[in-house]
Image (cartoon, helix red, strand yellow):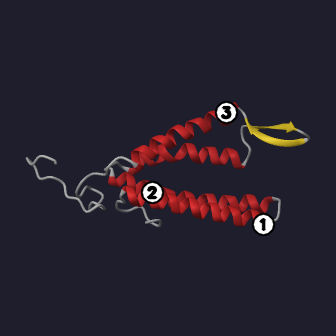
């Protein structure tokens, strides 16, 4: 399910992939925080984890798009690009500014980063409704057989 972009997955497969990826990223993040020294090493590790999770998430999204009988391009780009842009901006502090609070310095998002964050959240919500809640195409479609095992109604036959 997580290594190729062919075929279809059901809503259940989508949610299992999403939750599994969240758990894996949380474990990897916790491990990086606890064992890696400061400096550039954690940033490089974060880049590796981000690219790996993006690949896995892309496979899940593409297969779910296939189940909805939608082409992967441009839908996957539309669904994934704002989040990728936000991740890049966050990792490299693009559009962030330093603010001193109680003697400690924090990086907070500026107007541009905040706008990208809101766009990413809106597109992410749309993606979760589209892929996580709406039914796939019943029966076989151009991307493969129905992962839920359903069959499409024959021509002239009404849907139940």
Asked if 114 appears above or below 93 in the picture, the reply is above
Mark nearer the viewer, 2 or 1: 2
- Position of 136 with respect to 18 (left or right) is left
Name the residue that disc number 2 marks. Answer: 15
Q: CA distance from mark 2 to mark 3?
A: 31 Å
Residue 115, position in %: x, y?
A: 62, 33
* Residue 36: mark: 1
Q: Quadrant of the N terminus?
A: bottom left
Name the residue that disc number 3 marks. Answer: 112
Is disc 3 surrounded by few (<14), some (14 to 19) or many (20+) residues within 10 Å?
Answer: few
- Position of 53 with respect to 153 (left or right) is right
Mark nearer the viewer, 2 or 3: 2
Is disc 1 in contact with disc 3, using a CB cutoff of under 8 Å? no
Task: Name the element at disc 1.
Answer: loop
Is disc 2 surrounded by few (<14), some (14 to 19) or many (20+) residues within 10 Å?
Answer: some
Number of numbered discs visible in the structure rendering = 3
Q: CA distance from mark 1 to mark 3?
A: 31 Å
| 44 or 33, nearer to the observer | 33
- Going from N to C along the chain, the mark reached first, 2 or 3, is 2
- Going from N to C along the chain, the mark reached first, 2 or 1, is 2
Residue for point 74% across, 44% down: 93
Task: Name the element at disc 3.
Answer: helix
Is disc 1 surrounded by few (<14), some (14 to 19) or many (20+) residues within 10 Å?
Answer: few
Task: Name the element at disc 2.
Answer: helix
Residue 32, position in %: x, y?
A: 72, 64
């Amino acid at each position: 399910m997580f290594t190729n972009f062919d075929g279809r997955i059901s809503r259940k497969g989508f949610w299992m992939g999403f939750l599994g990826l969240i758990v894996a990223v949380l474990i990897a993040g916790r491990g990086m925080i606890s064992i890696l020294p400061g400096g550039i090493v954690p940033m490089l590790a974060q880049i590796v984890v981000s690219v790996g999770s993006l690949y896995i998430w892309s496979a899940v999204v593409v297969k779910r798009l296939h189940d909805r009988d939608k082409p992967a391009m441009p839908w996957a780009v539309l669904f994934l690009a704002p989040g990728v842009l936000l991740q890049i901006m966050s990792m490299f502090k693009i559009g962030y500014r330093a603010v001193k609070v109680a003697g400690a310095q924090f990086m907070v998002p500026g107007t541009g980063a905040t706008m990208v964050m809101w766009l990413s959240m809106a597109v992410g919500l749309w993606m979760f409704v589209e892929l996580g809640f709406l039914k796939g195409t019943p029966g076989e479609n151009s991307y493969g057989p129905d992962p839920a095992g359903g069959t499409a109604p024959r021509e002239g036959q009404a849907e139940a």
